[in-house]
Every structure is written in structure tokens, then in C-alpha cells.
Amino acid sequence: MKVDLSDFKAPRARKGFTLIELLVVLSIIAILLTISAPRYFQHVERSKEAVLRENLATVRDAIDQYHADKGVWPDSLQALVDDHYLRALPRDPITESSETWLLEAPTEPGSEQAAGGVYNLHSGAEGNGSDGKAYSEL
């Protein structure tokens, strides 16, 4: 009896992954995401707060420069842009708008009445930052 060797083929190398291997990899990815996602969102919020603080400092400095140059407070934030103290109105990164700034008028010495113009500004965003301080108090 003669045996034909073509009937006994070597097993082919398997291609791809088994279901168990895929499940293990997906489980590891899910665990890593549950650890890293909250940290990512905390960093996003902190960066928005940092941009807000920087925007407030920049605009407040421009208001002070305007007052030092002209002797009066600007009538609006747009006056700072029109007179080239700012290139554009900065965006509040929390509300994602340049229209939500809360403007503070200057007060006359010994009086509670506003003298007109813009003396200071605050964020119009509701809520508190990571330090517990309200955005409107920054």
C-alpha cells in the first residue's frame, strides 16, 4: 500500500486573533481609558481656567493703559479694540463667547454711583473653578 503524501498537508499558519485575545486587549484598553479619561477632562478645565485668567489680565492691563493715555475709562470693550489697545475682544473660554463679560464701572471717591465707562471686567460664567472660587470673582 502506497501512501500519498499530498493527503497529509502541513497545517497552515493561522492568521488573525482569537476571540479571547481580542477580549483581553479590549479589556485592557477599557481599563486604561477609565483611568486616564477623568484626568484628561480635569486638565481641559484647568487649561480653560488658565486661559480665562490670562485673558482677564490682558484686558485689565489694556483698560489701565487706555486710562493712563487718555485720562478717561473706555466706554466699552470695543473702544479698546477700536483704539488698538487690543487686536480683538478675547473670548471667555468658559462660556466660549466674547459677549458674556461682566463689566464693572468705576466709582467716584466717597460715592457708590458709577462714573461711567469700564473700570474692570469679570467672567459671566456660572459655577466655580477648581480652586472653589466663582468664575465671576476672578
Image (cartoon, rainbow, N blue to C red):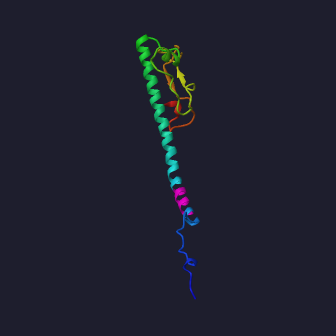
Evaluate whether residue 96 shows in this view.
yes
Which image quarter: residue 95? top right
Report the number of discs: 0
Asked whether 118 or 3 is in front, the reply is: 3
Asked whether 95 or 7 is in front, the reply is: 7
Q: Quadrant where the N terminus lies?
A: bottom right
Residue 8 position (above or below residue 45):
below
Q: Residue at x 53, y 56 (%)?
A: 29
Image location (x, y in percent) of residue 31: 53, 57
Asked whether 120 or 84 is in front, the reply is: 84
Q: Is residue 26 magenta?
A: yes
Residue 84 position (above or below residue 129):
above
Image location (x, y in percent) of residue 19: 59, 65
Furthest-front residue in this view: 2
Is most of the magenta stretch helix, strand or loop? helix
Q: From which residue to which does the magenta span run?
A: 23-31
Image location (x, y in percent) of residue 136: 53, 30
Q: Residue at x 48, y 31 (%)?
A: 52
Asked whether 4 or 64 is in front, the reply is: 4
Q: Is residue 54 magenta?
A: no
Evaluate whether residue 106 shows in this view.
no
- Is residue 26 rendered to the left or right of residue 66? right
